[in-house]
Amino acid sequence: MRPAARDGQSRLPDLSLLDDSPPEAILITHAHIDHTGSLPLIASLYPHIPIYATESTCVLTEILLRDSVHIMEQEGLKPDGETPLYTVEQVDALLGRIQPVSFKQPFAPLVTAPDILAWYMPAGHILGAGMLYFATPEGTLLHTGDISVTDQRTIKGVDIAALPNADIMICEGTYGNRAHTSRREEERKFAEAVQETLARNGRVLCPAFAVGRAQEIVLILKSYRASGHISPVPIYLDGMVRSVCAAYQGQSHDLHPNLQRYLKNARRPLFVDPGLHIFAVRSHERAELITRKEPAIIISSSGMLSGGASPLYGATIATREQDALLLTGYQDEESPGAALLRARPGLPLQIGSQSVVLACKVEKYNLSGHADSEQISQVVMKVAPRHLVLVHGSPEALASLKQRFVDIRVDVPVVGSKLNFQAVRHRVLVPSMPDVEAQTGLFDASPRLAPIDIDEQPQIPSIESLWILAKKLGPLRPWTIVELGQAYYGDAYRPTLRPLIEHVFKSDTSAYFKRSRIGAQSIYQPCETALGRSIISDEEFADCIPEMSLVLPSRVIQDEIPQRVPGAGVVAIVQGQKNSSPYLALTLAPAQNGGIRMITDGWKAAVRPLSMIQLLPDVRRTEWLNVPDETNKMRLKQWRQQLDQAWIDLFACWRRCQQSSFSFTSLCQDLGLCQADDRLALGLELLNHGLLLFRRDGEIWHPLDEQRVYSNDGFAHHLHLLEAGAGSEILVNGRPGRLTGRSNWRLFEVYWNEMDEDESERMARVRASAIRLSL
Ligand SMILES: [Zn+2]
Ligand SMILES: [Zn+2]
């Protein structure tokens, strides 16, 4: 569907084209409205055909279609408004008919053709997005839907190496004639623009697509705020963004493994988290927030300012010089967002219902969720189809993409044309499913991958068996319903079994699990003892798993064990003795007999015991191996000086990971430290001061308890200032200023309200003990 259709364009696709060959099933790739918007209508035209989608797509489709029908009804009430394309009843009917399926789980979409199997493979792009693979007696077909190859913060990109071959491939080409800039670089520029605005006391509005983009932005901001690059001002989420964030949280099993680890270790919500000053705006609070002038970041749908809450904020923010409006997605030419990008300061402009004079900074950043031309080529090359069909892109993008493939048949069909695929049947290659005999029953050789029978009656677990499983596989971690389901049913788990596990927890299960909530999601922590015991034998464990499942280690989130034996050219953080100052080291040769030759910023090159290596922040400088030792020592020294200036606040880390232990690697992931320098600075600081706030047990760091930390007056004062946050008015020996939000070990950055004559810097590093909050 085309929601923002212009005059002369239809909002709906031409459904009469289906008359000659009516569909026999509908398979949804993902929830975006250009892929689901007309489904309520199509479904009601074909009331008896099955409809499939991944579980996460079902959840998001519901939010999007309910919003869409609501907007249509509102529109319809206006005197010259368009009539709604469908009704709430039609949306309900569609939602009730979609059968949720899991990724990588073959199913037979047509009852009349059981030898045609289909399964979803993760497509990156947004939560729940799947590529569809079809295996038929005539050959195989891969339909990409919308794909992203780059890893996003919410979702991992397409794993090209794991893609199967296919005879026919239908591929998207949105960015068929463009190349992306580096994602990390783009995120960094975006974060810089945010901080520049906050530093001049301004507000930032990020109009964002509610599904996918808004969640990415929250995570980018969280990460840059945690590393001190963005001041900890409040972040407000408004519009449909709120419900989509809740849906993402509830489907955590489909999110990036880093986020699942964060949930497990930090036990904090992923998006809306009042404890971290990330709030969902309630409708009655909006008017006040629009007029409030304090520094803040607002993330609101729609992404093009064409509707929703973003134009309401946009109309005031656009008029203030110190504010900024940062766009992060595609802007339709006729949209207010595109008009903003074309606008010149001082000239009038239409945002929502208001005409305003533009004064704020407007910028656009490319945080695309689509593969670019080079990435699409890589995907196609791996799938190696005989026949390629390019769709979902402008004619120019698809024509340019077509030129990349000279050896295969490529079609760029126009809407309404029919394509006939010849039976190619030259192979059925499914890498993860070996020994598959092509002609007879594709998956007979591999019973675990037998197509699921949606009507089969599964065994319902008892609360005892769930407790035993959780106790054995992850006694210290909280479990989600889906994780418990996956542990119990193994590879036979499917979304239709989720209600069964939910049902088990409907009765009083407090003797077995402690229930709590992370944002919109319930989590269950197995009790230390239940049934009068706390130790589970292997037999008991085996007994409580139903026959249909096989417990595989992959279903439990594994903690990585840091590699302690580095090769040559690795940058490590070393320490001679506990409590002595740490050094930055470069290993010069592979380890031998428990020793390794290295040079540090403080010592000359020599073979030192391996045990001296404390942290490996995953940084390499192999190109330094061919230069004299003295040069390397100088480099390490300069680097170290630079790292010591970084804003790393261990108090903030301590506050953040209350009650949950971490390894250095997991802490880096939780904080989203993707730059080598950030990880090194954190590592050095952890060894410098970490033992004052954490207890160390080998690789694992445990936060000291609150009482102990707060009993130190200096620490309590530091935490107090942290809580007050960026922008707080303070006095340093009577001199007024504000906290910028950046802090370090017992130091805060201060912005002076007025400058002394002989000063060149407006900001200064001031000892926490000298700072008083002014009332
Ligand atoms: Zn999409
Ligand atoms: Zn799309």
Image (cartoon, rainbow, N blue to C red):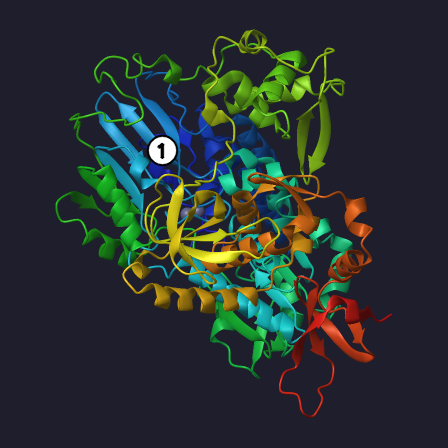
The picture places residue 663, in percent across and down from the top left corner, at: 56, 42
Q: Amino acid at mark 1?
A: Leu
The image quadrant of residue 700 is top right
Ligand 1 is within 8 Å of the C-beta of the residue at disc 1: no
Q: Tell me the residue that label 1 is attached to.
A: 132
Left or right: 82, with 608 as reference point: right
Most extreme residue toward the right is 775
The picture places residue 226, in percent across and down from the top left corner, at: 61, 56
- The residue sitting at 55% across, 17% down in the picture is 488
Most extreme residue toward the bottom is 757
Left or right: 546, with 400 as reference point: right
Indicate the secondary structure of the residue bearing disc 1: strand
The image quadrant of residue 50 is top left
- The residue sitting at 83% across, 79% down in the picture is 734
Is residue 20 or residue 391 the one in the foreground? Answer: 391
Is residue 144 or residue 306 the one in the foreground? Answer: 144
Most extreme residue toward the left is 407
Q: In the figure, 162 relative to 109: above or below?
A: below
Q: Is residue 436 visible?
A: yes
Is residue 76 or residue 741 the one in the foreground? Answer: 741
Q: In the figure, 439 relative to 635: above or below?
A: above
The picture places residue 274, in percent across and down from the top left corner, at: 72, 50
Q: Is residue 353 visible?
A: no
- The residue sitting at 68% across, 41% down in the picture is 519
The picture places residue 349, in percent across and down from the top left corner, at: 57, 76
Which corner quadrant holds the C terminus? bottom right
